[in-house]
Every structure is written in C-alpha cells, then in structure tokens.
Image: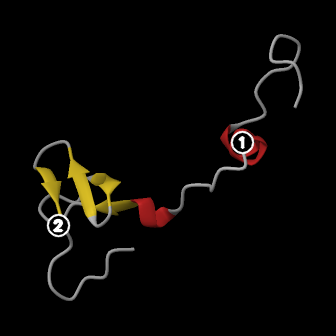
Amino acid sequence: MPDERSSPSAGWREVYRAMDAPEPTDEDRRDCPDCGDDSPRVRGDTYWCPKHGTWRPRGGEAAG
C-alpha cells in the first residue's frame, strides 16, 4: 500500500481491497417505502430513513 503522505487516495474501492474488506453493495441501501428517500442498511434487514427513522421491508419484499 502506498505511503499516504506521498500518494493521494485511489478511491474507496482500493481502500476496501487494501483492507481485505467486503465492498458495500446496492443491497446495503433501499428506498424508503413511505417517501422514496435513499435509506442505508443499519443492521440485518433494518434500514434508516432520515425522515421516518428505522424501517424493515414489508411482507413480500425481500431484504437485499
């Protein structure tokens, strides 16, 4: 990995790879069922909407 003082960041994908961490996927975000805003996954099948708080997919919706 390059010295951070002499090399600019190559982007988040390279950082994840250098750390051997799994890259986030689209499954880590969903649209809020009430307002359609982007909601990141906070844990398991629970998502966070800034306007409505936490929510889980309803009935037939698969969680990612």
Mark with earlier residue (1, 2): 1
Residue at point 11%, 62% (across, down): 34
User: What label sits on residue 61 in the rendered view?
Assistant: none
Residue 54 percent coordinates (x, y): 16, 53
Q: Residues at badges 1 and 2 in contact (C-beta under 8 Å)?
A: no
Q: Quadrant of residue 41?
A: bottom left
- x and y, in percent, of residue 33 in the image: 17, 66
Residue 5, located in which quarter of the rendered image?
A: top right
Q: Quadrant of the N terminus?
A: top right
Task: Find numbered disc 1 in the image and state the secondary structure of the residue it sits on.
Answer: loop
Q: Quadrant of the C terminus?
A: bottom left
Residue 39 higher or lower than 3, as above or below: below
Residue furthest toward the bottom? 60
Q: Residue at x 32, y 64 (%)?
A: 44
- Circle 1 residues within 10 Å: few <14, some 14–19, many ≥20: few
Which amino acid does the dot numbered 1 rest on? Met
Q: Amino acid at mark 2?
A: Pro
Q: Which numbered disc, 1 or 2, marks the residue closer to the eye?
A: 1
What is the spatial separation of the Cα atoms under label 1 and label 2, in whole angstroms?
Answer: 34 Å
User: Looking at the image, how many numbered discs can be counted on the residues?
Assistant: 2
Question: Would residue 23 be found to the left or right of residue 50 on screen?
Answer: right
Residue 22 image point, x, y percent = 63, 56
Q: Helix, strand or loop at disc 2?
A: loop
> Front-most of 40 and 37?
40
- Picture layout, residue 29 above or below residue 64: above
Residue 28 position in % (x across, y down): 43, 59
Few, some or many C-alpha atoms within 10 Å of disc 2 (few <14, some 14-19, many ≥20)?
some
- The residue wearing badge 1 is 19
43 sits to left or right of 1: left
Instruction: Identify which residue is drawn at 31% across, 56% down.
Output: 43
The residue where tag 2 is placed is 33
